[in-house]
Image (cartoon, rainbow, N blue to C red):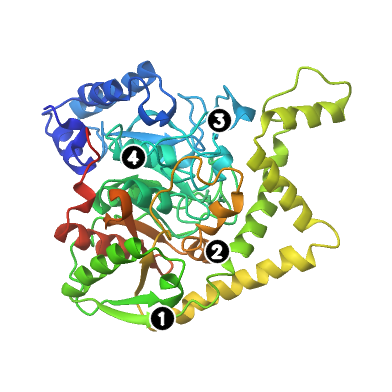
């Protein structure tokens, strides 16, 4: 089977259960493809650790104790801590760090039987929109290696698009699953905030951070998501008391009468015509299947940028205080006293975008500015969430673009962080509201680069989103198209 690397998670799971291939064979094939680290997608590869997990899976397949995804490989974004692999969060600060435990999400996928291929490159502490903020170098987009893969889960998106892994985990604080999925032509879903445990996910902005799967199809995402969700009350107090669900059960339900809300603010001047054309075609396909398009308004869409870029840095400035060279992280060699040790360790260990966010966050939280910035941002965040609830009176799901353009060129926004921030405009609103959102391949735009359709659902409507995406994927083959040579 020469095309093992192009098979879906579902197909691989079936071949493994029927023993047509072994977990070791599958892992060996992917490890061979990962050789030389194409696209700089991986930050840690350890074939011995992977093969040991695969052997354990083969034993379970042989003795009848296999999980539903037994032996299917997955790679993890480097913000999930893992025992078998190093975890750096893309930062020099954590270079060589090894966690004594696995993140709950990693554990969930391992319990379902998945074998870990390695750890995936990402923006430092997940702060970025292009994966250019990784301390270990940029990731290239498999569709055009002169372009960014998106971020911050850029390694995850590139690995799946390039056939280096059938699926990957990602995290999404303001778009980091949806936007790289869109830029690399794969499918990704961020569930409702609180659905998946944040335990063992290195914190960026805790009130926004959420884990989710990235894979070629909605069906594969559903398989992974089912193993990633569920309450974790002892270890993540914000994990919701909602039982895990089999997200594959509702796949295939007809779309007749489904009301798809089209927010006019997502289709304004900033949206590139090529992206709009692809999104419109995908929407036309959904209407052909019986869905109805309903005009809606999310009037505070533009405000989501300043609100997010106040709240996320504020939380980051607090979360990242633990990396001080004592409790965690790199410790400078030369220092004179405790304070100089803190200063030098942080100066050496953290990258410039992370420092910018810590400074912004500290500023907006400081006495005298708290009311003007942080408190104000919190109030508008609530209004953004209310706007969605108003919109959901008239529609069942919301659809629009994931990003205003296709993937830009590496280095294009160098020295202009705000250019990256502005490109987050369509993913930030759902993040601020804590709503589930996904990116579904919707064709190609300028330079034959992939375009994603964004679907946003009400709280706990992941199954509905996955079904809409699945129906689209039954009628189109955008998600099956591959970059040259894959
Ligand atoms: N681009 C956004 C940021 O830089 C979102 C990142 C994310 O979702 N982790 O903060």
Q: How crowded is mark 1: few (under 14 residues within 10 Å), some or many (20 or more)?
A: many
Residue drawn at the location 41% of the way across and 83% of the way down: 393
Q: Which of marks 4 and 2 is nearer the N terminus?
A: 4
Query: Regarding mark 3 in the picture, which secondary structure is present there?
Result: loop
Rounded to the nearest whole Å, what is the CA distance between mark 2 and mark 1?
18 Å
Image disc number at residue 144: 4
- The N terminus - image quarter: top left
Rounded to the nearest whole Å, what is the CA distance between mark 3 and mark 2?
26 Å
Please tell me in which quadrant of the rendered image residue 356 appears.
top right
Image disc number at residue 88: 3
Image disc number at residue 439: none
Q: Which of marks 3 and 1 is nearer the N terminus?
A: 3
Give the percent coordinates (x, y) of residue 96. 57, 21
For ligand 1, tell me if the residue under mark 3 lies within 8 Å.
no
Instruction: State whether residue 154 is above or below residue 444.
Output: above
Is residue 449 among the parts visible in the rendering? no
Instruction: State whether residue 473 is above or below residue 277.
Output: above
The residue to which callout 2 is attached is 432
Give the percent coordinates (x, y) of residue 358. 71, 46
Q: Which of 432 and 283 is in front in this view?
A: 283
Q: Nearer the viewer, residue 411 or 342?
A: 411
Q: Earlier in the sequence, mark 3 or mark 4?
A: 3
Rounded to the nearest whole Å, what is the CA distance between mark 3 and mark 1?
42 Å
Query: Regarding mark 2 in the picture, which secondary structure is present there?
Result: helix
Residue drawn at the location 36% of the way across and 36% of the way down: 145
Query: In the image, 88: left or right of 458?
Result: right
The residue to which callout 1 is attached is 296
Rounded to the nearest whole Å, what is the CA distance between mark 3 and mark 4?
27 Å
Please tell me in which quadrant of the rendered image residue 91 appears.
top right
Rounded to the nearest whole Å, what is the CA distance between mark 4 and mark 2?
32 Å
């Amino acid at each position: 089977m020469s095309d093992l690397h192009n098979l879906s998670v579902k197909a691989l799971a079936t071949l493994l259960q029927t023993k047509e291939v072994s977990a070791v064979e599958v892992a060996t094939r992917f490890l061979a493809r990962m050789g030389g680290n194409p696209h700089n997608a991986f930050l840690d590869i350890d074939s011995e650790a992977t093969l040991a997990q695969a052997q354990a899976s083969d034993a379970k397949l042989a003795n009848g104790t296999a999980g539903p995804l037994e032996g299917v490989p997955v790679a993890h974004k480097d913000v999930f801590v893992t025992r078998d692999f190093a975890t750096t969060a893309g930062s020099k600060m954590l270079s060589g760090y090894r966690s004594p435990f696995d993140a709950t999400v990693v554990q969930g996928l391992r319990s379902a039987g998945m074998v870990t291929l390695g750890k995936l490159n990402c923006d430092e502490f997940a702060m970025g929109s292009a994966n250019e903020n990784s301390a270990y170098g940029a990731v290239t987009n498999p569709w055009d290696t002169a372009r960014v893969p998106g971020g911050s889960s850029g390694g995850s998106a590139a690995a799946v698009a390039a056939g280096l892994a059938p699926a990957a985990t990602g995290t999404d604080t303001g778009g980091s699953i949806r936007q790289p999925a869109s830029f690399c032509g794969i499918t990704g879903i961020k569930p409702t905030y609180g659905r998946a445990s944040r335990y063992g996910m290195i914190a960026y902005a805790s009130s926004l951070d959420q884990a989710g799967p990235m894979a070629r199809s909605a069906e594969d995402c559903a398989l992974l998501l089912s193993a990633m969700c569920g309450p974790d009350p002892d270890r993540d107090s914000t994990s919701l008391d909602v039982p895990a669900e089999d997200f594959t059960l509702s796949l295939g339900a007809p779309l007749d009468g489904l009301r798809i809300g089209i927010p006019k603010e997502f289709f304004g001047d900033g949206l590139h015509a090529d992206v709009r054309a692809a999104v419109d075609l995908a929407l036309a396909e959904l209407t052909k299947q019986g869905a109805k398009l309903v005009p809606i308004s999310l009037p505070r869409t533009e405000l989501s940028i300043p609100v997010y870029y106040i709240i996320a840095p504020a939380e980051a400035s607090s979360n990242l205080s633990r990396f001080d060279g004592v409790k965690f992280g790199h410790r400078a060699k030369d220092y004179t006293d405790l304070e100089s040790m803190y200063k030098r360790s942080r100066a050496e260990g953290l990258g410039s975008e992370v420092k910018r966010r810590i400074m912004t966050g500290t500023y907006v939280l400081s006495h005298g500015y708290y009311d003007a910035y942080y408190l104000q941002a919190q109030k508008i965040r609530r209004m953004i969430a209310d706007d969605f609830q108003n919109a959901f009176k008239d529609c069942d799901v919301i659809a629009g673009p994931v990003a205003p353009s296709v993937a830009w060129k590496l280095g294009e926004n160098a020295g202009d962080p705000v250019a990256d921030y502005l490109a987050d405009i369509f993913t930030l609103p759902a993040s601020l509201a804590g709503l589930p959102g996904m990116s579904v391949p919707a064709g190609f735009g300028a330079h034959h680069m992939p375009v994603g359709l964004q679907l946003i659902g009400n709280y706990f409507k992941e199954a509905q989103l996955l079904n809409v995406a699945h129906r689209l994927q039954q009628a189109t083959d955008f998600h099956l198209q591959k970059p040259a040579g894959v």
